Image (tube, helix red, strand yellow):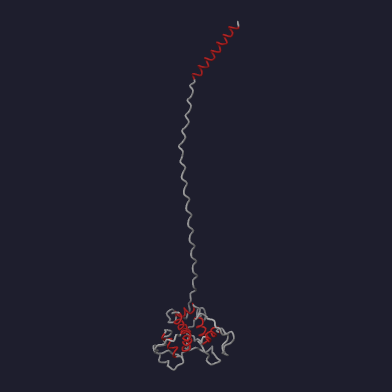
Amino acid sequence: MSKKKILTVVLTLLVAVCLLATTALAGVAPSAPSMPSAPSGTTAPSTPSQPSQPSQPSQPSQPSQPSQPEMKFDDVAEGAWYYDAVMWAVKNGVTAGMTPTVFAPLEACNRAQMVEFLWNAAGKPTATIKAVPFTDVPDAAWYEDALLWAYEAGIVAGTTSTTFSPAKECTRAEMVCFLVRLLSDGATDNMPFVDVPASAWYYNEVQWAWANGLTVGTSATTFSPDKVCNRAEAVEFLYNAFAE
């Protein structure tokens, strides 16, 4: 076979192959490109929640006040005429009970005790003197500071020039004199007590005490100046003078 024929055959085959390929490709429908999916709607960013307000710290509770121990004396009834005076005297350090449960309101007071009571009620002022002229007052006596103050202030004098008689029972007249010499402003008034003569050494003091409400006497017309002053009467005098 001549070269020309061979070439013709080859070209014919190539054309046939190309036609077959074209027909084959035409029979397969190309799939449509898929549409890109629409992007999902953009979610709006959520508004950040407001930070919670910090809770206010709770106010600290006030510490409870310590309760005062109840003062109760078996021999001081609440209805007694001296009840308020006793409670005031013990609470304010004027005096204390004979024991934690016994006040002994009817027990007599002596002169040393009276001076101590008065000094306590007055706030325990300090004297400038260091000694008194009384030979019956021992050094460092338990009532020494009270006596120094009372003697220097002219509230008490001795039973003599050299004795104070600290253990001697104190009368109502003496107690009133101690008080009035501390408190008196010189005011006086008529007095209803028939057992307090104008010549009595304690007349002016009892008169002032009555006029200023420190005492009402043992009756409407008697003061009983020589009666021993007991603990109930002593604190009542002081209560009338300092608490009201």
142, 51: nearer the viewer: 51
Residue 214, percent from left and from top:
43, 84
Is residue 11 shown to the viewer in this render? yes
Asked if 29 appears above or below 72 in the picture, the reply is: above
Given the current orientation, which residue lies at the most extreme top position? 1
Q: Identify the image quadrant of the C terminus.
A: bottom left
141, 149: nearer the viewer: 149
Residue 37, percent from left and from top:
47, 32
56, 169: nearer the viewer: 56
Answer left or right for 20 relative to 208.
right
Answer left or right for 97 relative to 193.
right
How many marks overall? 0
Q: Residue, x 46% and y 45% (percent of image)?
A: 47
Q: Residue, x 48% and y 57% (percent of image)?
A: 56
Given the current orientation, which residue lies at the most extreme bottom position? 199
Residue 20, percent from left and from top:
52, 15
106, 228: nearer the viewer: 228
Residue 239, percent from left and from top:
45, 81
Asked if 84 appears above or below 16 in the picture, the reply is: below
Q: Residue, x 56% and y 11% (percent of image)?
A: 11
Q: Identify the image quadrant of the N terminus.
A: top right
Is residue 1 shown to the viewer in this render? no
